[in-house]
Image (cartoon, rainbow, N blue to C red):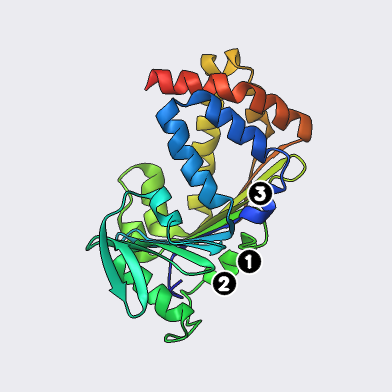
Amino acid sequence: LDADTPIVAHVDMDGLRQSPYYPLVRDALMATLSEREQGDLRNVLTVLDRADHIVVGADPTQEQGVILMRGSFEPGHLDLLEAPDGQFTHRQHALRGNSNSRGGVTTDTMILGSTERVHRALDRLDGLLPATGPPLAGFPEAAGRAHLGERDVSVVVLLTEEIRRGFGQGDVEQQLQQSGLSAGASLDARNGIRLSGFFTASTEGAVQVLAGQLREALSEAQGDMTLAMLGLSVLLQQIEITERGTDLLVEFRLDDQQVRDVLERFGPLLQAFLTAL
């Protein structure tokens, strides 16, 4: 990735496949999809099962991003994710896509994304660009707090001035525009589930406003009749919101049995959601 990428996510696919819940989620998804949708999902899973690690980098202000998957691939695997389009080359690399986005496969890496980012990623992999560079101010600290690359899933969002300008006009959005610095989250799913998140601001007031909004939304969700009928409203009680100066911390934990109970209800819940849509 470019060193100044403000949004970075990492998925340890090798680790997720070791989770006892991975096959349960796959089966639950399959049970709710049509035959055509099941075929599309199988294509995606075929690629994911050949990936060991996935890294996503994005810059929403430039509408650019790139996905890199490290594993064992063949050129035909690219067609499983998107319909064949135009053919292009970047030096010795054969790419598929259009003028705005491209995809390509090497023996151990699949790359998808906006054309410019894909080209730079290939140049970096081939040693034509520096492997590292100066990151955005605050990114290393935020990445450390989010355990980026250390847990099953991890993500960091650096709230640059350009990103903050894109927020709306509500109370929370204004606080984010004025004081937001960074946010991040990580997920472990080996024995139960632990989801940890944080938001950091330059003022305690911004943290207080966001915490109040989250608690209000959580209270409303706990009274939702659909969640109550599915027996899921009790799960919201497992969410802990903590204000610590200019940091907002969120923790969500489920033990192994709670996770399995949720997955048993996952099919009916997803089906009800899709029906409502």
Left or right: 39 as drawn, with respect to 186? left
Residue behind mark 1 = 144
Could you classify mark 1 by the number of other residues whose Cα lies within 10 Å: few (under 14), some (14-19), or many (20 or more)?
few
Tell me where residue 140 sits by quadrant.
bottom right
Secondary element under disc 1, as helix, strand or loop, is helix
Left or right: 257 as drawn, with respect to 43? right
The answer to whether residue 242 is above or below residue 165 is: above
Give yes or no for contact between labels 1 and 3 (Cβ–Cβ under 8 Å): no
Residue 206 horizontal/vertical position (percent): 48, 51
Q: State how far apart marks 3 and 2 are (Cα).
A: 25 Å
Residue 38 horizontal/vertical position (percent): 47, 32
Closest to the observer, 152 or 219: 152
Secondary element under disc 3, as helix, strand or loop, is helix
What residue appears at the point 30 percent right and 53 percent down from the top-left corner?
Answer: 84
Could you classify mark 2 by the number of other residues whose Cα lies within 10 Å: few (under 14), some (14-19), or many (20 or more)?
few
Dot 1 amino acid type = Gly
Residue behind mark 3 = 16
Residue 195 horizontal/vertical position (percent): 65, 45
Residue 257 visible at all: yes
Closest to the observer, 242 or 271: 271
Q: Earlier in the sequence, mark 1 or mark 3?
A: 3
Q: State how far apart marks 1 and 2 are (Cα).
A: 6 Å
Residue behind mark 2 = 140
Q: Nearer the viewer, mark 1 or mark 3?
A: 3
What residue appears at the point 50 percent right and 40 percent down from the top-left corner?
Answer: 42
Q: State how far apart marks 1 and 3 are (Cα).
A: 21 Å
What residue appears at the point 70 percent right and 32 percent down from the top-left corner?
Answer: 259
Give yes or no for contact between labels 1 and 2 (Cβ–Cβ under 8 Å): yes
